[in-house]
Each structure stands twice: as C-alpha cells, then as structure tokens.
Image (cartoon, rainbow, N blue to C red):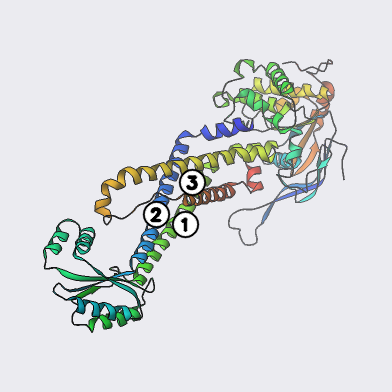
Amino acid sequence: MKSDLAIELKGIHKNFNLAGPKLIGGPKTQLALSDLNLKIDFGEFVFLTGSSGAGKTTLIKIILGLLKPSAGRAFSLGTEVSNFTLRKNAALRRKIGIIFQQPMLHPNLNVSENIELPLYFEKISEKEKKMRVWELLEILGLNAISHVPVQILSAGEKQKVSLARSLVLKPKLIVADEPTGNLDPQSAQHLVKLLHQLRSFGSSILFATHDMSLVKSFGGRVLELVAGNVHQSKAAQKRSHEAPSFFQNNTGELTP
Amino acid sequence: MIFKLSWRQFLSRPSMTILTLLAMTFCLTLLALFWNLNENLSVTQKGSQVQQHDFTIFLPGNSNEIKLNTIKNNVQAFHLIQEVNHLNQDEVDLQLKTEFPEKLGQMISDAPPLQVLQGKFTAPKLSSDEETELRKHLDSYDLIIDYDLGASPLSDDSAQKLFNWATLFLIFVFCAVALLISHLIKVILDSGKNENELLLLLGAPLKLRIFPLLTQAFSLTTLGILLSLGCLFLFHDFVLPRISAWLLPEGTPLQFLSFSSVLKLSAFTFASTLTGCFLSWPNNDEKIAKKI
C-alpha cells in the first residue's frame, strides 16, 4: 500500500517498555502515542508543538523509520515505514532532510565535506556535487568557514551546516526535531525563515519545537501533541492565515 | 569520500591507535615467539629420533681381534641389530672430540685406550621391552665394559609429553592472543561508533559505513603483523645469539618462523580482527534511535 501524501499516519500507537525493576501491579509500559492520525501534504509547513515529553521526538522517529510503532501504519513520502527496521529504512531517509536537535555533524569532516556527505549516498556527478555545496554555502553564509573543522564551530554555525546537509539532496520532505533548541532567538528566527522559504520548492517541512514565540512569528499549520495525540492549535492556525508566507518570495529562490 | 572517511577515521584518534598498535604488536610478537619455539622444538625432536639409530659398545683396549670379532658377530646376530662395525683408534679420538669438545674430550682421550664397536638398530626406535631385552643380552658378555644405546636423557615418551606440553601452551597463548586482538579491534572500532551511527541515521549505504571500519581494523592488523615479525626478526638475529649460550645447549639449531607459519599467523590474526569487527557492529536499532 502506498500514500500520495508527504506524511500519513494511521492509528499510530507507541508504548515503551519501562526499564528497571517494576513495582508489583504497576504499569509495565508507558504510552507515548495513542491512536494518532495525521496527514501532511506536499508543500506544507507544519509546526509540531507540545511540552517536553509529549512525544514529539517519538513521532518524528516513527516518521523517519527509526522506531517501529506498536500499532498503526506510517507512510513517509508515500512509502510505508512502520514495517521495517532502522537499517531497511536507510534508503528512504536519504530522501528526507533530517535536522536533529544536536547538529550531529561528522567530526572527521570539515564544513563543506559535511554538507557534501549525503551526495555520496546517491549517484551524482562531481560537478553537480560541487555546484550544490557551493550554492548552499552561499545561501547560508558559510563560505568563509567552508574548510573549517566542525568541532570549532559555534552552536548556530553547526546548526546551519546541519541544515545545509539536510537540503543538499533537495528533499521533498524535511523533518526538524527542535533544531532551535541550542540557538539564540535571532539565529532561531533565521533558521525557521530559511526553512519556511523552502515551501516554494514544493518541499514539506515538519518542524518540532516547544518555542511558542517562534510558532507565532511564522504561522503555518500548527499541531499540538497532547497526551500522545494531535490537536490543531486554533490560535496559531488563525495566525497562519494572517501571515501565510511571511518570508516567501514568488521567484522560487531562497534569500539568506 | 569513502577513502577520505576511512583515512580520517584511522587518524582521528592517534593516541588510541598507537596504543592499540603497540598492544597488538606485543601480543603477536609473543605468539610468534612461542610459535617459533614450538617449531624449533619439533625440528630438534625429529633430529633426536634420527640419532637414536646409533649405539656404541666399549671393550678393553687389550682385547684381541678374535675376541672382538666374536663379540661383534654375537651382537650382530641379535634380532634388533642391523650392523656392527669396529672403529679404529683415530675414528674413536675424532668422535670423542666431536661429542665432548675441549676439556672433557681431552680427559677421555688421555685415558687408557678402549676398543669401540658402533652399530645401528633395525628400527628407528626401540620399545622399552626391546631395550631391556637388548641390555640383558649385552650384559651377558663379561668383556663388554660399557655400552651406550644412544638414547637421549629422556625417553621418547617423556620427550613427546614435553612436546605436547609446549604445544598445549602454544594453544593457550594462541587463544589468549585471539581474544585480545578481537577485543582491541572492538574497542577501537567502538570509539568511532558515533560516526558510524550518524551515517546510518542519515541513510548512508552499507559500503560507506562498513569500509572505514574495515580499513581501520585491517590497517592496524597488517601493521601489527609486520611490526611483530620485525620484532621476532630482531630477537632472533640480534638478541638470541647473545643469550643462546645461557639458554640453549650448544649446537642447537634455531630457525626463523617458517613461511607457512607466517601465513598461518597472519590468517589467524585477520580472523581475530574480523571477529572484533563483527562484535562491534551496531545491532541495536532502539539504542541508536535513542541517541537522537
């Protein structure tokens, strides 16, 4: 079975086995997600909010095929990910731009090599590789530090490199798990602004955050995770109608 | 990129790489030394078996030719003996000098002359019953002063048991080194696990994840083997000649590790390395997913 949506979740349940000695009669599992249904179309920018421990990261891991749901079916870019393991879903993750809370850069590679890394997962010509990396360095203002080892970068710079790496394969789906967690408000705004502009390329973006000020600044569809299930946030939804694409230009180009 | 990743991974932790290499070299040198010792023991044991063919009978110097021939014919008639020859005095002196060099040889050669008969057994080895039977036969001749059946200070069984001990000891060293090498490889590969798991999370194909690990492991192993053989060579050619008089009986031949043993040692080391690689391969998906 396939799906025509960027993300489609049907009746997702996720329980975690509790580690350590269990109390007699106490719960043996903890419910993280309960009967969760979600559809995200291509070209949508969706904020995923919720308090810490609400299950945002769990939901994202299921979408990326890193975790198997206890029940239900999950589709990413039209492919079912709920039946396979982390290894089997590797090919699908190449098509998804992933931005983690921690930038998770390869410590043995410099800035441009880190950005270039996913290009080696696919058959792309050397010329094309150089071109794409150069473009992203330019857009994200990383030109000056392109040959710098990533260990000495600031948190904001690392997150920019992580963003560039997630974009280099021109993914149709970008999943960001609290990427602004370690950034100052200005850098956070800048990062979301860049992601927001990607809508013009038809990419879907799922952006998990608990920073409501950021959500209010940009609008778009907002989903709130409460007790393992998704609720539409009406206030933000209203805001999203007020400013549907604040930073988007109509030329289809990204502006730094 | 695949070579860049492999090379950078190899160089990323220099102190750990050097320590692993030294530990691996030490372990392999130890194993190579035992292996070499075992090989030399094996050669020496085979050599001693060949020498057992000869026996010597000592008769008084004043024995006349008739008596000598009678003894010679009687001994030769015994079913375990193939042939007996009479040695003239020059041959006796030469043999004494060869077997007992310097002072001991001089002392023996200065003693009253003896008539010596030397012969060969029909079989390469005598059983203990056959040896007893022969001894009884030789003891029955009053004219025979003494005899030497050419047996080594240890019986064949004892020598074989000692050799078995050496082989058993080699097997223990072998197992210990195999476990240590696997462990060393696992430890150094585990130190780069985060990089490998990052590649897995980003969806890197298997070859891009496995190649840097294998390159690191097998480069270390190759260097370890070469260094250990170098150490063995130095020990064999420079250290052993200086201490051989203190350690070994004079004239004991010592060979370097044979080519087939070098190949076996290398194959064994690579197999241990492969085991280490296999054990360090990330196999717990949930643990990897939790790192995000």
Question: From the viewer's perspective, is residue B107 above or below residue B221?
Answer: below
Upstream in sequence: badge 2 or badge 1:
2
Q: Quadrant of residue A77?
A: top right
Residue B6 position, x and y percent, is 58, 34
Q: Mark 3 to mark 1: distance in Å? A: 14 Å
Amino acid type shown at disc 1:
Cys
- The image quarter containing residue A135 is top right
Circle 2 — which element? helix
**Image check: B221 left or right of B165?**
right
| Residue type at the position of mark 2 | Phe
Q: Secondary structure at mark 1?
A: helix
Position of residue A105 in the picture relative to residue B89 (left or right): right
Give the mark, 3 or 2, whose residue is nearer the N terminus: 2
Q: Marks 2/1: CA distance?
A: 13 Å
* Residue at mark 1: B175
Q: Foreground: A33 or B266? A: B266
The residue nearer to you, when weighing A127 against A251, is A127
Residue at 16% across, 70% down: B114
Q: Which residue is mark 2?
A: B34
Q: Amino acid at mark 3?
A: Leu
Q: Quadrant of residue A211?
A: top right
The location of residue B74, given as percent across then percent down, is 28, 81
Q: Residue at x 42, y 61 (%)?
A: B167
Whether residue B292 is visible here, answered yes or no, is no
Q: Is residue B127 left or right of residue A175?
A: left
**Which one is nearer the viewer's eye here, A76 or B279?**
B279
Q: Which residue is mark 3?
A: B184
